[in-house]
Amino acid sequence: MTLDLLPDTEAFLSAWLRAQSELAALVGDRVYTVLPEAKTWPLVRLVRVGGAPLATAEDSGLWADAPSFQVDVWAARKADVWKVTRTIQALLATRIKGTHAALKVAGVTLGPTQYVPDADVATPAQPRVILTLDLIITPLPQGVTP
């Protein structure tokens, strides 16, 4: 019996964001799941902070995943951190829903944003915005390609 696993949503979302030309124009390929030792601003880090897989009532397996993410955006200037944040929000709101390589994004909910300068990464505190989002992701059946 083959065990079907849910996709790695953190890897999917980070790769998807890096592939968006409008975001790449602002941050290059600096969309991470773990901050690098040497940092170049602006940059984005996303981390899956919660969510739950969804199982069928018939115990026939997991049919979807509902991950929750925290996205941290850092930049050298406050105006830049907000521009990157608004770009990410617009991309998620307008483009992420639909079929991708091995999964389908069935829903996206953008959560609150907070401006929280970060004294842990730089002195004086580095401009940072934290935003949250939730996705509903279903894997495509094996052998199905978009």
Image (spheres, helix red, strand yellow):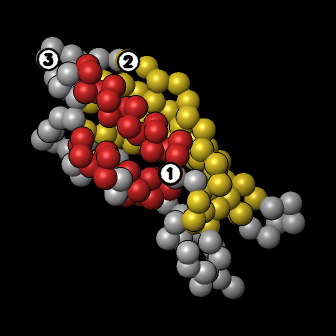
Badge 1 amino acid: Arg
The total of numbered circles placed on residues is 3
Give the class, few, some or many, for how many residues have Cα within 10 Å of label 3's Cα (few <14, many ≥20): few
Dot 2 falls on a residue whose secondary structure is strand
Give the residue at mark 1. 95
Residue occupying image coordinates x 15% and y 38%: 39
In space, the residues marked 1 and 3 are separated at their CA atoms by: 36 Å
On-image quarter of the N terminus: bottom right
Q: Is residue 118 among the parts visible in the rendering? A: no
Query: Which residue carries the number 2 mark?
Result: 115
Q: Residue furthest right?
A: 58
- Please, what secondary structure does the residue beneath circle 1 have? helix
Secondary structure at numbered mark 3? loop
Residue 8 seen from this side: yes
Residue 120, by quadrant, is top left
Q: Residue at x 87, y 66 (%)?
A: 58
Please tell me whether residue 121 is drawn above or below residue 141 in the rendered image. above
